[in-house]
Image (cartoon, rainbow, N blue to C red):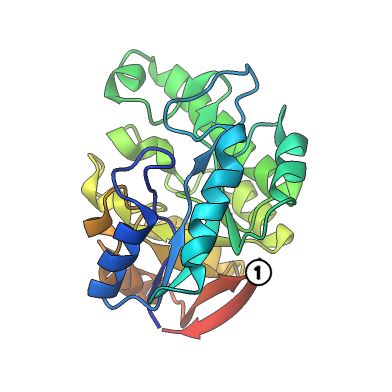
Amino acid sequence: MLTSYHNHTRHSDASGTVRENAVAAQRESLDELGISDHLALHPGGVQLKWSMSEAHLPDYVADVLRFRESLKPRVRLGIEADYFPETVERLRALLARHPFDFVLGSVHYADDFQIDQGTQSWKTLTAEGREARWEVYWRRVAEMAQSRVFDIASHLDLPKRFGYRDSEEAPPGALKALDAIAEAGMAMELNASGWFHLVQEPYPSLGLLREARRRGIPVLVNADSHRPEHVARGLERGRALVREAGYTEVVRFEGRKRFPIPL
């Protein structure tokens, strides 16, 4: 069974419609396609250009649900929701109003620093400044898990996107974050999009993936597509990597419940 749950549409920052993504997924022989557009409740009240607005959420949900039963492959209603400590309780209440199959939890901000904004924002930092951003990032990931709002930890170690890696492959902050994910009973994704970014490595690294396996954290492999033709990009390579890390199964979601799939 082949799934890809992390895929974006015009509802946030991508180019395709739900139907166009489903047609592409059928062409790629996917069994389940997750739609998971961005929702970020910025604590400053800023409407981020890559996120749908809170007011748009019902329209998004209705659009995905229109296709959930009528298309092949099976369309799953998901969302990629950002964790901010100041707005997480508002997010919890908002998500509870809708019949999501899964909720991806992401951290794109280390306090006021957007970690995936561009190379220049990292380049201008000192080495100490970069290390500090990494430390805040891992702390926020741990807090995200501890909130119990999310089902799947999304693109762990994302700050390496532009090549500015953490000082260690498995720093204490990352291990604490993985401990929190395991304790919360969350799954995590192997996000294949990193192979097509400057870093040319998936999120997370193989080392962190092995640490996740040691903690019994379930995994699924996602493309993180922003164009319909990319819904299956990197999936087979990702499945091979999770096998290398010691996994014998991945997971799928329905109604925010998790089900195993043998690799």
Relative side of 191 to 147, left or right: left
Q: Secondary structure at mark 1?
A: loop
Q: Residue at x 62, y 18 (%)?
A: 45
Query: 253 and 148: which one is in front?
Result: 253
Relative side of 121 to 187, left or right: left
For residue 155, above or below residue 87: below
Query: 231 and 199: which one is in front?
Result: 231
Q: Name the amino acid, label 1.
A: Gly
For residue 206, above or below residue 175: below
Q: Position of residue 199 (x, y in %)?
A: 26, 42
Which residue was labeled with disc 1?
255
Q: Residue at x 42, y 60 (%)?
A: 190
Q: Position of residue 181 (x, y in %)?
A: 65, 56
Q: Residues within 10 Å of mark 1 (few under 14, many from 20)?
A: few
The reply to whether residue 172 is visible in this rendering is: no
Q: Quadrant of the C terminus?
A: bottom left
Q: Position of residue 226 (x, y in %)?
A: 31, 47
Classify residue 62 by image quadrant.
bottom right
For residue 229, above or below residue 105: below
Q: Quadrant of the N terminus?
A: bottom left
Q: Position of residue 97 (x, y in %)?
A: 73, 50
Q: Residue at x 65, y 52 (%)?
A: 150
